[in-house]
Image (cartoon, rainbow, N blue to C red):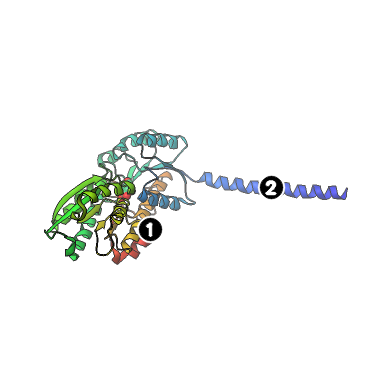
């Protein structure tokens, strides 16, 4: 009988402890459902640079908002469906990394119908489309700036290394790995990097230009064929981003470059950690910091403020330009300021 009593007492305590912890869990649930839901799309998770922007958005959202974040897998149709789902799940604002920069109006139509604010980021919509909806903003960069800065990095390095003009003809023979055609960053980087080199009085010859779609593997494949075709006649490898530059370096490594005095100058954009390693190893001349952390922060800050019904810039240090865009500056990166770039990606 005594034993039975003891057993019942233990059972009672157990029940109490269990129901108490259930209560605690419920309270937690309540706080998380009190946070506003923000719908976030990334054009594809399998993109080097965007994985850092994604990480930044995630970390700035901690304890402030519930993110409904999806991988649009490089399909605009998929992204459109994801946006519909976010709206029906009660998102209070949308943060959209378009797949197709031309699809901004489709997203705006959906947001307008649901009376939801939308912050586009990374792929800049046409100014007229953004202006067509008073609850639409953009967070990104001034695309041309990255091309100009990349051009300056190339000019400085080329002038410091006359031996890079291997055939001594006074002309920089370059190949260019382009990002996604039609992407404002890819178009501007391609144009302004070369324009800046020419404006500095350096003659250029374009041996090859092809899109590697921002992708390392594609960058390597294309570089393999260019090295086979032109070999040492290539004197500069200009890449619209570091992902493709890393692919090109892999290809050049396999072809025996970066050993002894066999060298090939490669430049990129983004300053992702893997590229910084290549700069430290002397295999990459330089890159341009595309500030993933601050672009992620600005995207979250604006999307959060508008989700709370506040002014997009409330309590932030960001400013909007005439086209309702926050533009985070680019910075040149070489071995001389590598620590600064490493810091930016932490
Ligand atoms: C660019 C970046 C690329 C790629 C692209 C995706 O700003 O430099 O590496 O991530 O965005 O839209």
Q: Residues within 10 Å of mark 2 (few under 14, many from 20)?
A: few
Q: Secondary structure at mark 2?
A: helix
Q: Nearer the viewer, residue 53 or 26?
A: 53
Left or right relative to 10: residue 255:
left
**Rendering coords of residue 194 (x, y %):** 18, 52
Q: Which mark is residue 109?
A: none
Name the residue: 33% across, 64% down.
280
Residue 281 rendering spot, x and y as whole percentages: 32, 63
Compared to 109, does 258 lie above or below? below
Q: Which mark is residue 345?
A: 1
Percent across and percent down for residue 181 are: 25, 42
Judging by the rendered image, the residue that carries numbered circle 2 is 18
Tag count: 2
Question: Would you say residue 186 is visible in this rendering?
Answer: yes
Q: Residue furthest right?
A: 1
Residue at image coords 85%, 50%: 3
Q: Does any portion of residue 189 appear in the rendered image?
A: no
- Residue 136's place in the image compared with 149, above or below, is above
As measured in the structure, the alpha-carbon distance from the residue carrying label 2 to the one carrying label 1 is 43 Å
Residue 79: give x, y in percent of width and height: 38, 37
Q: In the image, what residue occupies the spot 62% across and 49% down?
A: 24
Left or right, 82 with respect to 189, comes to right
Q: Is residue 288 above or below residue 80?
A: below
């Amino acid at each position: 009988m005594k034993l039975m009593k003891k057993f019942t007492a233990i059972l009672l305590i157990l029940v109490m402890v269990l129901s108490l912890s259930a209560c605690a869990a419920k309270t937690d649930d309540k706080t998380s459902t009190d946070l506003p839901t923000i719908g976030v799309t990334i054009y594809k998770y399998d993109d080097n640079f965007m994985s850092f922007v994604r990480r930044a958005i995630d970390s700035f959202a901690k304890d402030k908002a519930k993110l409904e974040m999806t991988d649009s897998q490089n399909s605009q149709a998929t992204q459109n469906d994801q946006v519909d789902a976010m709206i029906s799940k009660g998102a209070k604002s949308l943060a959209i990394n378009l797949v197709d920069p031309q699809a901004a109006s489709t997203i705006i139509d959906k947001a307008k119908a649901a009376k939801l604010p939308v912050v586009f980021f990374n792929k800049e919509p046409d100014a007229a489309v953004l202006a067509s909806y008073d609850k639409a903003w953009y967070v990104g960069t001034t695309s041309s700036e990255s091309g100009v800065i990349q051009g300056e990095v190339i000019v400085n390095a080329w002038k410091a290394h006359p031996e890079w003009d291997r055939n001594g003809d006074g002309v920089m023979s370059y190949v260019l790995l382009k990002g996604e055609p039609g992407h404002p960053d890819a178009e501007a980087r391609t144009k302004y990097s070369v324009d800046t080199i020419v404006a500095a009085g350096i003659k250029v010859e374009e041996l090859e230009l092809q899109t590697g779609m921002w992708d390392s593997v594609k960058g390597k494949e294309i570089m393999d064929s260019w090295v086979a075709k032109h070999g040492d006649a290539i004197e500069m490898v200009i890449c619209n981003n570091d992902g493709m530059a890393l692919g090109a370096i892999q290809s050049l490594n396999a072809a025996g470059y970066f050993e002894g005095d066999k060298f090939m100058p490669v430049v990129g954009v983004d300053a992702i950690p893997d590229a910084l390693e290549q700069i430290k190893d002397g295999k990459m001349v330089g890159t341009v910091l595309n500030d993933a952390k601050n672009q992620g922060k600005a995207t979250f800050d604006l999307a959060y403020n508008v989700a709370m019904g506040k002014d997009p810039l409330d309590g932030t240090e960001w400013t909007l330009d005439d086209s309702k865009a926050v533009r985070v500056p680019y910075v040149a990166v070489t071995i001389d300021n590598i620590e600064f770039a490493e810091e930016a990606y932490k």
